[in-house]
């Protein structure tokens, strides 16, 4: 073939099928499809692996989130003269006054779980409103969500009798002696909450 000065020699003529890299033969449509299918399968495997990894990560994060969440209550009594009293408890073995709280129970809403903790730790039964009064950090990593619980019954003996102390304080007194500004802030919100209920 005579070369024309200044012309560029093409490896494949336009419109011609490319040759197979292995055999040197022209790749048939079936071979192209097979090659494409192989690539698709590899891509699908990667996508599935990625999705599975994401699912596991989300599950782990959900479990960690659940472990880092707690719920508790401000158990209160509203006396005939308008005096508000709240039940505070001590940690097991004694210590500063705090609100009844605990880990979120599986299969329960936050306020249901909070009412259960009030029953176990403070020996009170009542109506727990799902309206959250506030939240605060406990041991830095745990978030405690607090709900108001109107006391309907105070048990003489309860699950943690002898392990904790409990006392019904006037709200003003409770705000002064509660352990931590975060808890005191939640207690102050109780008055506003009750004002809206009346």
Image (cartoon, helix red, strand yellow):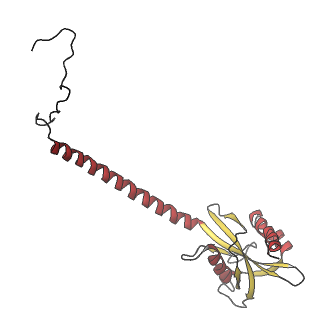
Residue drawn at x 19%, y 21% is 10
Nearer to the camera, 164 or 8: 8
Direction from residue 27 to residue 176 in the image, left or right: right
Residue drawn at x 62%, y 77% is 113
Nearer to the camera, 93 or 165: 165
Count numbered badges in the picture.
Answer: 0
Q: Residue furthest bottom?
A: 156
Residue drawn at x 85%, y 83% is 79
Does residue 151 sit above or below 191 in this rendering? Answer: below
Does residue 121 sit above or below 184 in this rendering? Answer: below
Q: Residue furthest front?
A: 15
Q: Position of residue 15 (x, y in %)?
A: 19, 29
Question: Splitting the image into 4 quarters, where does residue 92 fall?
Answer: bottom right
Question: Splitting the image into 4 quarters, where does residue 100 fall?
Answer: bottom right
Q: Position of residue 40 (x, y in %)?
A: 28, 49
Direction from residue 86 to residue 7 in the image, left or right: left
Residue drawn at x 72%, y 76% is 94
Q: Position of residue 46 (x, y in %)?
A: 33, 51
For the C terminus, the quadrant is bottom right
For the N terminus, the quadrant is top left
Nearer to the camera, 141 or 196: 196
Direction from residue 185 to residue 34 in the image, left or right: left
Direction from residue 32 to residue 121 in the image, left or right: right
Q: Residue furthest top?
A: 5
């Amino acid at each position: 073939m005579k070369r024309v000065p200044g012309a560029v020699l093409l490896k494949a003529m336009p419109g011609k099928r490319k040759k197979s890299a292995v055999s040197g033969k022209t790749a048939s449509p079936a071979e192209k499809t097979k090659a494409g299918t192989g690539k698709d399968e590899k891509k699908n495997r990667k996508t599935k692996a990625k999705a599975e990894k994401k699912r596991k990560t989300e599950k782990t994060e959900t479990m960690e989130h659940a472990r880092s969440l707690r719920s508790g209550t401000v158990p209160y009594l509203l006396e005939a003269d308008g005096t508000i009293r709240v039940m505070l408890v001590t940690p097991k073995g004694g210590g500063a006054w705090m609100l009844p709280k605990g880990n979120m129970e599986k299969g329960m809403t936050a306020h249901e779980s909070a009412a259960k903790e009030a029953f176990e730790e403070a020996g009170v039964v009542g109506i727990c409103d799902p309206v959250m009064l506030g939240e605060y950090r406990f041991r830095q990593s745990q978030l405690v969500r607090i709900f108001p619980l109107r006391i309907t019954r105070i048990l003489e003996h309860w699950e943690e009798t002898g392990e904790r102390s409990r006392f019904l304080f006037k709200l003003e007194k409770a705000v002064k002696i509660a352990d931590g500004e975060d808890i005191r802030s939640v207690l102050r919100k109780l008055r506003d909450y009750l004002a809206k209920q009346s």
